[in-house]
Each structure stands twice: as C-alpha cells, then as structure tokens.
Image: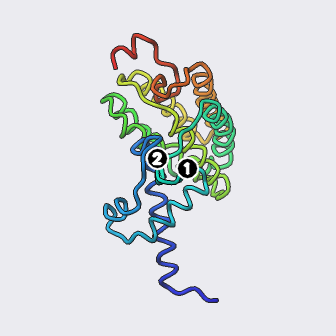
C-alpha cells in the first residue's frame, strides 16, 4: 500500500512537534508531572490534533511521557537512581562524541563558542530558562558532530532523564561554574584536541553524577549542575 503525500506531510509535522515538546521537557519548560493536553498544544502551534497525538505517542514510546486513565498524558517523573545512571552513560557518550566528531566540531567552533558564551551570559543574569536552552544546544552540537543517528537518539533520551530530574536554585553560582567548564571544552575543540575535549566532557558529567548521588530525593534540593543545595541556600529560595 503506497503512502499518500499527505501522510508524509503529517509524519514530518509530527516529528517537528515531537522535537518541540522534547526541547521543552529537557529545558524545564514542561517540568515532571506537567499535563500535556493535545488540544491545547495543537491550538498553540496552530495545527491539527493528529500530528500532536502522534508526537505524544512517540514520546510515550521513548518513556519521556506517560498516559494514565482519567489523568491524561504527563511528563514522566524521574527517580534519583535513574538520573544518576543516565549521567554515567551520557558521560561516556559525550566523551566518545568529542573524539569522533573532533574534525567536524573544529569547523563549527564559532557556533559552539557562541552557545557557551550565551550560557555564561544567562548564568550571570540568573536566567535559568535561557541557561538550560543554551546548555542543551551546546551538548547537542557535540553529539551531532558524530553524524551518528543511534548515538544522537540515545543521547536525547538520556538528556530527557537528566533534564527532567535536575532542578535549579535561585542563585547563579553553580550555573556560572558549569558555563566556565563549557569554555574549557571549546578551547580544546578549537585546538582540534578531541581527546582532551572528550576527557573534559566526561569529567563534566561525572561531577554531576557525584552531586546526584549525594542529593536528597526531593528534586527541589538539586542545582542545575546536580550538586546539592545546602539548607541555607534553600532558605534563600
């Protein structure tokens, strides 16, 4: 049975909708537990409900969202153990990505540096939403440089797990520290040193693993970089 052009158009639109929703989940626009209403999303994006329904089904298959009777579809909540394990695997993937994609990354070093600088600027302003956006873009560029679709899909699913669990404090200190590490990675890329860039990326993620391991179960006790917020810091929030 041949597919009609309209079927391809709808499938393409569903893929774009899925990407939009995934981006919002990862950057915290849709925190864990947020209900995703098909009709509301379709109205916002000015499209029919069919591609939104397909996008939500794809996200459910990827375990990014879950659907329950009488409660609808919601962003899945992530446990501390799952988040820690996701960081561990992502550390290995990003180290590999930097090594394999070193040559391609060097050609895009200006773009990579722009994302790092934008993340730093957002961190200094204490703008959590923009910081998360540029942080995701920075790491995605590194993964995309491998031109490996399987690696990219795996990384994206892990990024959801990490982004859905980690929460931000209202101070920008930790964001600035992480953004500074991004700049060190950029300098290694600019030299064409994929091995060092990979090592820095792995260390970057492993530090976050330690933070998650030490954190309490409540998501609100975690900083953007996964480090625990002390009682005094929580009192200021």
Name the one closer to the observer, 64 or 176: 64
The x and y percentages for residue 215 are 56, 21
Q: Which mark is residue 161?
A: none
Name the one closer to the observer, 153 or 78: 78
Which sits earlier in the primary sequence, circle 1 or circle 2?
2
Judge whether 203 appears above or below 94 on screen: above
Residue for point 40% across, 57% down: 37
**Residue at the extreme front of the image, as rendered:** 70
Q: Can residue 196 be seen in this view?
A: no
Quadrant showing the N terminus: bottom right
Q: Which mark is residue 25?
A: 2
Label 1 belongs to which residue?
64
Judge whether 120 appears above or below 65 on screen: above
Residue for point 63% across, 58% down: 147
Label 1 residue SS: loop
The x and y percentages for residue 184 are 52, 31
CA–CA distance between discs 1 and 2? 8 Å
Dot 1 surroundings within 10 Å: few (below 14), some, or many (20 or more)?
many
Label 2 residue SS: helix
Name the one closer to the observer, 174 or 40: 40
């Amino acid at each position: 049975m041949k597919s009609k052009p309209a079927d391809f158009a709808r499938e393409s639109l569903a893929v774009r909708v899925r990407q939009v929703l995934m981006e919002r989940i990862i950057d915290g626009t849709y925190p864990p537990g947020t209900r995703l209403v098909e009709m509301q999303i379709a109205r916002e994006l000015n499209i029919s409900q069919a591609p939104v329904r397909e996008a939500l089904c794809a996200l459910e298959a990827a375990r990014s969202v879950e659907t329950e009777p009488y409660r609808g579809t919601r962003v899945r909540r992530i446990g501390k153990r799952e988040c820690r394990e996701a960081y561990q695997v992502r550390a290995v993937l990003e180290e590999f990505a930097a090594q394999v994609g070193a040559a391609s990354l060097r050609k895009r070093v200006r773009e990579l540096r722009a994302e790092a600088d934008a993340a730093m600027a957002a961190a200094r302003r204490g703008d959590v939403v923009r910081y998360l956006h540029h942080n995701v873009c920075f790491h995605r560029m590194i993964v995309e440089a491998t031109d490996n679709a399987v690696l990219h899909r795996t990384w994206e699913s892990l990024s959801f797990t990490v982004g859905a669990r980690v929460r931000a404090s209202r101070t920008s200190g930790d964001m600035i520290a992480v953004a500074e590490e991004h700049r060190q990675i950029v300098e290694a890329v600019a030299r064409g040193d994929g091995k060092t860039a990979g090592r820095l990326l792995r260390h970057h993620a492993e530090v976050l693993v330690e933070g998650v391991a030490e954190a309490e179960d409540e998501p609100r006790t975690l900083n953007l970089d996964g480090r625990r917020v002390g009682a005094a810091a929580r009192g200021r929030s």
